[in-house]
Image (cartoon, grey):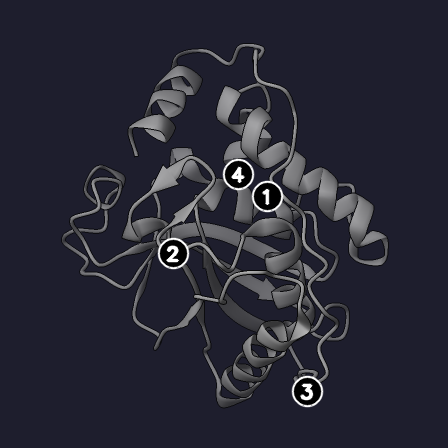
Amino acid sequence: MKFKAAFLAAALATATATAFPASAEEVFNAPVATRQANESGLQTAIFAGGCFWGIEAIFSHTRGVQSAVSGYHGGTERQASYRLVASGVTDHAEAVRVVYDPSVVRYDQLLQILFSVGADPTLLNRQGPDRGPQYRSAIVPLSQEQREVAQAYLRQMGRSGEWNDPIVVAIENPRRFYEAEEYHQDFSLKNPNNPYIRRWDAPKVEALRENFPSLWRTDYRTG
């Protein structure tokens, strides 16, 4: 938490060039889902995969995504603030609420993107430099269809041989999603030279562009 908070303080003061290399975490070849989602009309999904800045950024560059909003899932309204969530004392996860058009990008494709370039599904309560249950990886299905697709996909990931360690992603029951503070929204777009963004999140966006060209959108979809 202190690692990320230090970069946040630096970004809010002034965005400066980073001394860190723009080297990505490991990119995985998450499998194409054998159980594909069957949805119509705009749909909403919630995903957690470590710091919400990077997850929001990759989905904001994904074709078919109408909005990606950073927030907190799993705890109470009273404790839904960055100061408390980042301390690790609440039940929240940093999460992103995604509204998408399934005629352009399916739910199972969003899962494939998440676990290819967004989050390592074998890490428990941590991603990158961040540690604590607030950085857990979780899927929050908002419909029976999403739940069945997510369950099938996690089983498929475990059988794929892509990861040497067990898959530890949780499927969580939906609870209220609390939007994060305004300064967190579209954070990577507003702070491209922030050291944390340059080191940990910009490479995820580049990996999306390289590995999912048919679903890549050059423009960042805000909101």
Residue denoted by label 4 = 186
Q: CA distance from mark 1 to mark 2?
A: 22 Å
- Kindly identify which numbered label has been placed on residue 38: 3
What is the distance, in whole Å, between disc 3 and disc 1 at their CAs? 25 Å
Q: Residue at x 59, y 32 (%)?
A: 189
Q: In the rendered image, which quarter contains the N terminus?
A: top left
Q: Nearest the camera: 122 or 8?
A: 122
Q: Residue at x 24, y 46 (%)?
A: 85
Q: Earlier in the sequence, mark 2 or mark 4?
A: 2
Mark with earlier residue (1, 4): 1
The residue at the point 75 percent across, 72 percent down is 32
Asked which secondary structure carries label 2, the reply is loop
Image quarter of residue 38 = bottom right
> Can you identify the residue that label 2 sits on?
124
Q: Amino acid at mark 4?
A: Asp
Closest to the camera, between mark 1 and mark 2, is 2
Residue 107: x and y in percent read 63, 73
User: Disc 2 or disc 3, which is closer to the eye?
Assistant: 2
Q: Are marks 2 and 3 in contact (CB under 8 Å)?
A: no
Residue 106 vs 29, above or below: the answer is below
Amino acid under disc 3: Asn
